[in-house]
Amino acid sequence: MCGRYMFQPDQNPEIGRIYQLAVDAGYQPKTGEVFPTDKTALIIAGDHKVKVVAMKWGFPGFKDGQSIINARSETVRQKKMFADSFMKRRCVYPTTGFFEWNKAKEKYKFNFNNDPETLFIAGCYNYFDGEPQSILFTTAPNESMIAVHDRMPLILRKNQINAWIYDDEFATEFLQSTMPQLISQQEK
């Protein structure tokens, strides 16, 4: 499960460009540490190329005030809540790393290295009461994650973003992909 992540346009030029595209389109995505229900920058399908928007992170839950922020990639196509969104409205979360907690409640930050490098997470979105809301996908952990948590985000390389968003066959196959190795550092 990925419960928080970083979006640092002031520390990463690529994230800075993504943030500016959202602002230029009239959005104000949350920067810094992003929490569930925050409005976050997302890459979605445009008419002829991808575009950047901002929307709330989390689908409405089954109880008042509850948000569902993640979906298991292994079952997303079978779950009624996610299947249509996966097939029609895939998105990508641009981040500079994500956080996870182990069983002892110790917080760890994950990225490709110790710098705020761009890390893209696969997801989808849907409309609830006319408002778009998004969830991100998780998958089985790899060796870099297993000691901390039993799930990890479904991570895309930059050159896979268009295929994830526009190519149904690629997206379906990618749900079972092996994730890249990451570096973790414990947050104090």
Image: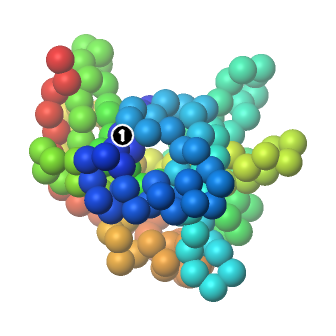
Q: How is the image coloured?
A: rainbow
Identify the residue shown where x is 47% and y is 58%. 20
Reply above or below: 86 against 62.
below
Residue 114, image x, y percentages: 12, 44
Residue 119, image x, y percentages: 32, 56
Question: Which residue in the structure is indicated by mark 1?
Answer: 6
Report whether 149 appears left or right of 82: left
Report whether 89 appears left or right of 42: right
Q: Which residue is at the front of the view, 7 or 62?
A: 7
Q: Is residue 178 visible?
A: yes
Identify the residue shown where x is 78% and y is 51%. 127
Report whether 126 appears left or right of 117: right
Quarter of the rendering occupied by the N terminus: top left
Number of numbered tags placed on the structure image:
1
Residue 61, image x, y percentages: 71, 31
Secondary structure of the residue carrying tag 1 is strand
Q: Is residue 182 visible?
A: no
The residue carrying pointer 1 sits among few (fewer than 14), some (14 to 19) or many (20 or more) residues within 10 Å by Cα, namely many
Residue 185, image x, y percentages: 14, 34
- Amino acid type, callout 1: Met
Identify the residue shown where x is 62% and y is 72%. 45
Identify the residue shown where x is 24% and y is 35%. 109
Q: Quadrant of residue 180?
A: bottom left
Reply above or below: 122 against 5.
below
Q: Quadrant of residue 146?
A: top left
Q: Which residue is at the front of the view, 166 or 17?
A: 17
Reply above or below: 66 against 147.
above
Quarter of the rendering occupied by the C terminus: top left
